[in-house]
Image (cartoon, rainbow, N blue to C red):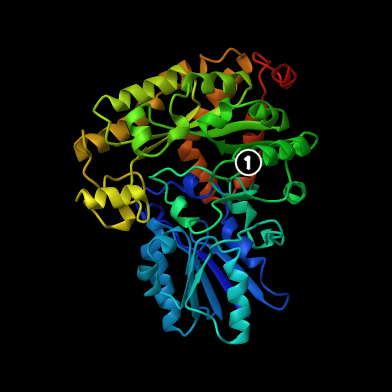
Amino acid sequence: MFVKFILPALAEARSPAWRPVKYSLFPPLGLATLAAHLGPDDEAQLVDDHVERLDLDDVPDLVVIQVYITNARRAYAIADHYRAKGCRVALGGLHVTSLPEEAAGHADHVFLGPGEQTFPAFLADVRAGHPASRYVSTHGRTIQDLPPVRRELIRRNRYLVPNSIVVSRGCPRHCDFCYKDAFFAGGDGFYVQRVDAALAEIDRLPGRHLYFLDDHLLGNARFARELFAGMRGMNRIFQGAATVDSVLRGDLIERAAEAGLRSLFVGFETFSPANLRAGNKHQNLSRDYAAVARRLSDLGVMINGSFVFGMDDDGPEVFDRTVGWAVDHGVTTCTFHIQTPYPGTRLHDMLAAQGRITSHDWDEYDTRHVVYRPARLTAGQLLDGYHRAYRDFYRWSAIARAAGTHASARHRAKHLAYAAGWRKFEPLWDLVIRAHRLALATPVLEAVLSRVPEASGPTMKGAEQ
């Protein structure tokens, strides 16, 4: 059986404002993971529409397409094309789980929730001649015994971070605006790999740099502690994501830094307690954001801070306040978002019930457009403030001022190199990507992340005492 796995390009990647660097970061690990369930006699092909040409002239036996909300239009067009040729088409992913009836109109089979449990069952049904039209992941989810990811299907030279890895699924938190909560509904919402399997996967990856794509790398403290203990002698440097409360709790973040953590995505989201309560992000309530920044800075860990604009308690002052705080506290990079009510989330249900949804064009659900009516801002104010926040945070003067907050000269230099390299030299990255020379960038990234400042905060030994 010839199986073709496709990640269609997101809407923004097909626009004149396309930023190649944004879409050449990570390979589609989810599809490569599903491919691992194929039999030895099956032929597999994986195509990422962002980084390579998608040939539509072939006739696979099975086409498997991963659907996000802003690639849904293209995903459906590709699905319709292959179905018209008589190919069997299966759709899965976040958007399919949120709107299965919409997706079902373009597929022979739809998958709701993560596919590690349902895809093997589907393959068995196909071979037996009686596949179902819908597969739903529920209880009993596990990634304890997954076969190795089919990394040979990935074109490593097309990605800035080919060594991406996932060692857990889901998130133990349940924020109202996050549609991954709907994706993992009806069963275990957060579960982890075996530590020995995770370490074996890491050991198979070349080079030093890793990027953990897990939603919450510190979400299971026991697992994370054992993982970092196993990584301490592997000479790796890595990036990942965690929550505000997990950074402040115990000594796990020190253990991560000693294992090689050099950059952390942190979901600050908002400074407003009212917004946090309304969004069910209680883990951030009464937390000292400044203490998070200090602790990570002392460990030499750069911060990618996530902030959301347009929540109901946000007024016109929210943009300057957010940028000012991030600069004053040495945040290296920021990811700003316009609040987006994804279908399937409690946020969407609430705004729809209030009649505040203003667009159902899924291409606009990219956290860069205003698709609802804000409470204390006009749509124009929200959009203008969002763009101004990016401009103000990434001004040379702001980058230099943020770098100057770090006590260590090495951390200041690392901050300048990373922040400036990511945004100020983006046209150069684009040229490298278009020339398919990303392998040249890997040593640069490793060199920047490897610079560890002189210790200015508690060591692990001090944290344990």
**Residue in the foreground of this view, choosing between 305 and 100:** 100
The quarter of the picture where the N terminus appears is bottom right
In screen coordinates, is 301 left or right of 463?
Answer: left
**Residue in the foreground of this view, choosing between 23 and 114:** 114
Residue 438 drawn at (x, y percent): 60, 46
Q: Which residue is mark 1?
A: 220
Relative to 38, say whether 361 is above or below. Answer: above
Residue at 38% over, 71% down:
77
Residue at 44% over, 24% down:
286
Residue 175 shows in the view: yes
Residue at 63% over, 78% down:
124
**Residue in the foreground of this view, choosing between 48 and 236:** 236
In screen coordinates, is 8 left or right of 140?
Answer: left
Relative to 152, say whether 134 is above or below. Answer: below
Q: Secondary structure at mark 1?
A: loop
Quadrant hosting residue 411:
top right
Residue 156 drawn at (x, y percent): 64, 53
Q: Residues within 10 Å of mark 1 (few under 14, many from 20)?
A: some
Quadrant hosting residue 45:
bottom right
Residue that extends furthest to the bottom in the rendered view of this protein: 129
In screen coordinates, is 158 left or right of 323?
Answer: right
Type of amino acid under label 1: Asn
Relative to 112, say whether 199 is above or below. Answer: above
Residue 166 shows in the view: no
Residue 139 drawn at (x, y percent): 57, 61
